[in-house]
Image (cartoon, rainbow, N blue to C red):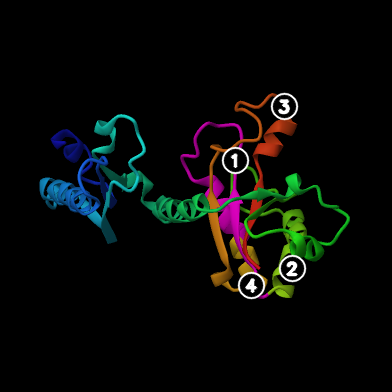
Amino acid sequence: MSNWIDSNKNSKILSIIGSTDKKGTTESNKNLSLKRVDFLIKTIENRIKYRADFKTIGLGEKESELSDNALDRKVTIYYVQEHQFDLEEFIINDFIVSEKIDTLKITRFDELKLSKKSSLNEITEVTPNATLFSLEGIEFQFDSDILLSTAKRNLLKWVSLLNQKPNLKIIIIGHICCVPRDDFKLSSRRAKSVKNYFIQQGISEERLQYLGYGSSKPKYSIPENNGYEALMNRRVEILILDK
């Protein structure tokens, strides 16, 4: 632990989460997980700075699903290093939104076999909440989060839908291709760029969330075999939350 502290003096801790195995009562495990977090905080002292809204969380046995009890008895530190500070917003946002998505039963629009000749308004009338749409023609300038003008035109049908359905809430999801990691959160920045475009078109920010999956959920294995596979991996999706 001392080596980790010494090598991260310029880092920032976002959250510390403690967990236990299922031995003992639920209440005692909850208290034990918090005690483990408190012990770690005392060990760190003030040698590493914390995010302003830093939280300690004691899960107790909540996420204990492993066959090896020893692996459940742990404390997890979420932190960013100094060179990642400008990505902090995206790291926090992606963590929160991905947890929300994990609680949903998602239906892919392509699996519903609905007529694509219907308007987007008609389609969303009959699709359930948590339906996931893959958008076509949403392209960005190379290696950036700047939307091309053609992409903005293709997004206008979603602007129209959001205007027609004032209760509609969505999550915009970004994916990248070609590389196994998204070290610069390009997928998150691109998803936020789409969100910002909707806001510029008069859509309330309260109805919009975004998330970047990097290249962790490709349609085709990475590295891709051709440009088409890369294009399918490098995509933007919209998940409907509420209608």
Q: For the point 75% across and 46% down, which residue is it?
A: 110
Query: SS class of the residue under badge 3?
Result: loop
Which quadrant would residue 73 be assigned to in this image? top left
Spatial CA span between label 2 and label 1: 26 Å
**Mark 4–mark 3 distance (CA, rounded to whole Å):** 37 Å
Q: Give the alpha-carbon distance from disc 4 to disc 1, as whole Å.
A: 25 Å
Identity, as a three-letter code, of the amino acid under mark 4: Ile
Nearer to me, 134 or 148: 134
- Amino acid type assigned to the residue bearing label 3 in the image: Asn
Disc 1 residue type (three-letter) = Ile
Residue holding disc 3: 226
- In the picture, the quarter occupied by the C terminus is bottom right
- The residue where tag 1 is placed is 176
Give the SS element for disc 1.
loop
- Give the mark toward the camera: 2 or 3: 2
* Percent coordinates x, y for residue 22 in the rendering: 27, 41
Name the residue tied to disc 4. Answer: 203
